[in-house]
Image: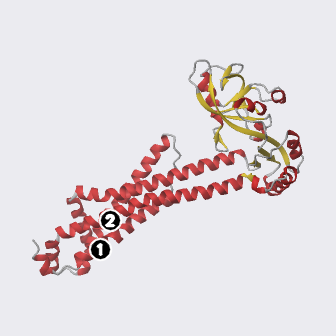
Amino acid sequence: MTKFINILKGSLKNIASNKLRSLLTMLGLVIGIASVIILVGIGTGSANQVTSQVQSLGADILTLNINSSDASLSYSQLDEIKEIGNVENVAPYKNVSSTVTRGNTTSQRASIIATTSEYMTVTNLTISKGRLLSEIDLENNSKICLLGNDIAETLFSLSNPVGQSIKIDGDNYTVIGVITAVGSSMGSNIDDMIIVPFTTAKYLGSDTSISNLYIKVSSEDVIDRTTNLIENYIKSSLGITSDYFSVSSQDSMLDTMDDINNTMSLLLGGIASISLIVGGIGVMNVMLVSVTERTKEIGIRKALGAKRMDILTQFLIEALVLCILGGIIGIVLGIGIGLLLGEMGYSFTPSIGIVVLSFVASSLIGTVFGIFPADKASKLKPIDALHTD
């Protein structure tokens, strides 16, 4: 144990005596480990954010999407879907992007949802000011709108927007209400969106065919059974196969997102890990240089009785210490930058598993890439080493 401590002290002394070289040696590892932590943390944070957004809509919601240009639902068929067992409500919707202005304010692109009065109930949204959409608004193709909380503040600042007008694609729309701030839902930021009656979609460059539907089910326990009933109804009423439509629940969407996020995290981690390999090669090169510089020292130690294992252990410990220090600095730097990015609005969730894995990886790199230089040093013959210039 005493011998090991002495070897460790000697290794630390050699590292400290070449501070700049040691720092440059660790730099590749620091960058690699920090990159892994940051990229995987951002991937994990984004995945958690999307998951919470989907879950916020509720596990009792189904989404119907028809992707056939020859098939769509009619309003009477919406009533028929409502009659299907366990279905409580339905809300058709269309997503449109349009230019929105108010007075002399700068024009901006905004996401618009064209839907019916049931949309607010199905998606659990409420209003903080004004009123909701009504059936009369749909029947009259009324150019009215509900504003998300953020876009209302952008367009109207501190004034009350209810009763005032905005222009959407050059047409005047009267604001009838402001949606209570909720953040994101279904992958869209409701606070930055505008809701208009479904029938006014024709004024925004879209048609009024019903191809997308939110369906509220009485209980999440009957999701699978209700999904089958709706699929059978669509097949029989529209005469299309399941290739042209999909009925998905929040659980199935979450499973799909998990698969995508896991793949992306693996890909990002793999890309960042390349830096670790480069860093390991850098460690090996520097240690080989160190062996060359200290050839006489090795010869003297061997002449005084140092064994091959002593020399091997010394150089291996030096490589290991360099990599462990680089790993610690990389972990601190990675978490620090990640938290800073979090303050700037990015989603960052540090993963304990990745942090531990990064530390283990840095140790393994020190061992693997330090073996060759250490082995080369330990095999030097004393007489050859002492005769080196």
Please name the amino acid that badge 1 sits on: Phe
The disc, 2 or 1, on the residue closer to the chain's N-terminal end is: 2
Dot 2 falls on a residue whose secondary structure is: helix
As drawn, 85 above or below 177: below
Between the residue at mark 2 and the residue at mark 1, the CA separation in whole angstroms equals 11 Å
What residue is drawn where x is 29% and y is 71%? 316
Quadrant where the C terminus lies?
bottom left
Please name the amino acid that badge 2 sits on: Ile
Q: Does the rendering let one see residue 135? A: yes
Q: Is residue 366 left or right of residue 16?
A: right
In the picture, the disc for residue 372 is 1
**Which quarter of the figure has residue 307?**
bottom left
Q: Does the rendering let one see residue 4? A: no
Q: Is residue 263 left or right of residue 356?
A: right
Instruction: Please state the horizontal and vertical placement of residue 221, each as a whole percent of the image.
Output: 80, 55
In the picture, the disc for residue 281 is 2
Mark 2 vs 1: CB contact within 8 A: no
Dot 1 falls on a residue whose secondary structure is: helix
**What count of labels does the image hold?**
2
Crowd band around label 2 with a 10 angstrom C-alpha radius: few (<14), some (14–19), many (20+)? many
Instruction: Please state the horizontal and vertical placement of residue 125, each as a whole percent of the image.
Output: 73, 37
As drawn, 25 above or below 172: below
What residue is drawn where x is 17% and y is 79%? 302
Instruction: Please state the horizontal and vertical placement of residue 165, each as a whole percent of the image.
Output: 68, 20
Q: Is residue 378 left or right of residue 384?
A: right
